[in-house]
Image: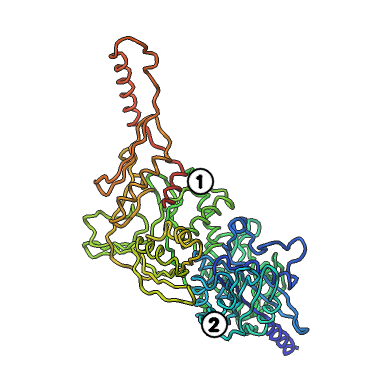
Amino acid sequence: MILLFLFIIFASMKNIRNFCIIAHIDHGKSTLADRLLEITKTVEGKELQAQVLDDMELERERGITIKSHAIQMDYTLDGEKYTLNLIDTPGHVDFSYEVSRSIAACEGALLIVDAAQGIQAQTISNLYMAIEHDLEIIPIINKIDLPNAMPEEVEDQIVDLLGCDPSDIIRASGKTGQGVDEILRAIVHRIKPPVGDPEAPLQCLIFDSVFNPFRGIIAYFKIINGTIKSKDLVKFVATGKEYEADEIGILRLDMSPRKELSAGNVGYIISGIKTSSEVKVGDTITHVARPCDKAIDGFEEVKPMVFAGVYPIETEDFEDLRASMEKLQLNDASLTFQAESSLALGFGFRCGFLGMLHMEIIQERLDREFNMNVITTVPNVQYKIYTKKGEMIEIHNPSGMPDVTLIDKIEEPYIRASVITQSNFIGPIMQLCLGKRGELVKQEYISGNRIELIYDMPLGEIVFDFYDRLKSISKGYASFDYHPHGFRESKLIKLDILLNGEPVDALSTLTHIDNAYTLGKRMCEKLKELIPRQQFEVAIQAAIGAKIIARETIKAVRKDVTAKCYGGDISRKRKLLEKQKRGKKRMKQIGTVEVPQKAFLEVLKLD
């Protein structure tokens, strides 16, 4: 009887396929996933809509995938039933951490390339990540129904990149459904079933989690070894906490409860956890009675690239913001934060993001999902400051910078950036990169008129507007990807913005000495447009230490006190104006300048 049970479990493992979809942004991942769900009849009738896995309102509005989405499909081939676990992943460089988590839970990957755009920077980046994890790659040329499709050229690019046989490449169209049956057959035949022992001690890798206000924290996991049953007593290895598995199940369009799940499966666990710090992505779940020998090697710790302060508009909302951030961190493990305070904005958090789009999305999600209105300060990157005493200080915020007289040198983070574009845009792109203090490492032709430029650039230069400007000068044809490339010494200075002589620490920034004057001037001009006129004159100044490098003045709103003086001596008018002037001066001493939230946001978007 036991042998029969084991045979059934191993037979069912043989028919499981875990795979993810990786591609550059806007290459048709979500549309192709829709067709896979439609053909396997996982989603039918009124549930079938465009971008069915992109369940966030924000994802549908922007047409991008922000979160990885796991779903299980049943597929029958040659009379045999297979279980296909699909994880749809984001394509933007800012969400590459989501991709790394999905890859850790899979044995294979569908590499999708747009037939009209060809290989892009993020395609290469995600592909290398998948190869490092030894995943089986199934190359697919998508959107072959487009009038400007060039499948032969794209096929050559894929062969050059992967070294595969042209017959291994599947031509498909997510829109028309062409080639989708062939993709499903390739998933069954080419991706290996998961390896694992259903009888070994339980080992589950947590690859994602979400917060449910009624049921607590729901953790998504992949079972590497062992079998888990409903009501089992389990332990989370990293935190050492023990829980009862109230409910386990598989991920369909909605959660589908099961009595037990064994090795190779992807599923979810609900155990009534209410505190977000008790669930860590990359942690291992095991049984309390029969624990595993060691935890699974989780994926790399996330390294934030951009740091910014996030503050509630109303100071009393600080604790609500903390709770919202913790719930958001569950769903987005790449968000890091710690409490800090600011003279201008009160109590808030210093947050680490993977890029500017990530920062924008987090701000939107705080507003929509948790109804939190927040102010985000000027983004900065991490700097290393070496003092004359030989100490090294890491700072993420200009306010933490020691006195200039104590600093020996400052190092800033550099990135190795890859830009893939058509050869007719090389001139403007090189000009843009050089303007951002980039150093050309190499350039090489990939195929035809497509070229890859490799640059070493300071991260601080690209966090503002680099990606948007790259897209506009290349008419949308350039793709961009980067990874950290160490620290280098640089001439950096702290630029302060003063309002009536008072520094606004939320607008302070560290910048290169060559950019300080132009940045200070632009910030002053922008703030002059955005700060409303007060009853008194407001001086907006940009300063480096005690030296003022730029100034704009917002004139006072003033009543025409001389209106009632018609005729008569000029001294009467002068007397009234002098009286008004004294009043304005007194008002300036006690008045405070209110900086609207819009001003903080617009200063971030200086082009």
**Quarter where residue 578 is shown:** top left
Q: Secondary structure at mark 2?
A: helix
Whether 234 is drawn above or below 379: the answer is: below
**Circle 1 sits on which residue?**
317
Q: Residue at (44%, 76%) from the top-left corner?
A: 445
Q: Residue at (39%, 70%) from the top-left corner?
A: 416
Give, as a three-letter code, the residue at label 2: Val
Q: Is residue 172 left or right of residue 448?
A: right
The numbered dot on residue 159 is: 2
Coloring applied to the structure: rainbow
**Camera-side residue of 163 and 323:** 163
**Camera-side residue of 327 and 271:** 327
Residue 85 spot, x, y in % from top left: 66, 74
Q: Secondary structure at mark 1?
A: helix
**Quarter where residue 381 is shown:** bottom left
Residue 259 spot, x, y in % from top left: 72, 73
Whether 369 is drawn above or below 182: the answer is: above
Residue 142 spot, x, y in % from top left: 62, 72
Give, as a three-letter code, the residue at label 1: Asp
Instruction: Tell me which label, 1 or 2, sits earlier in the chain.
Output: 2
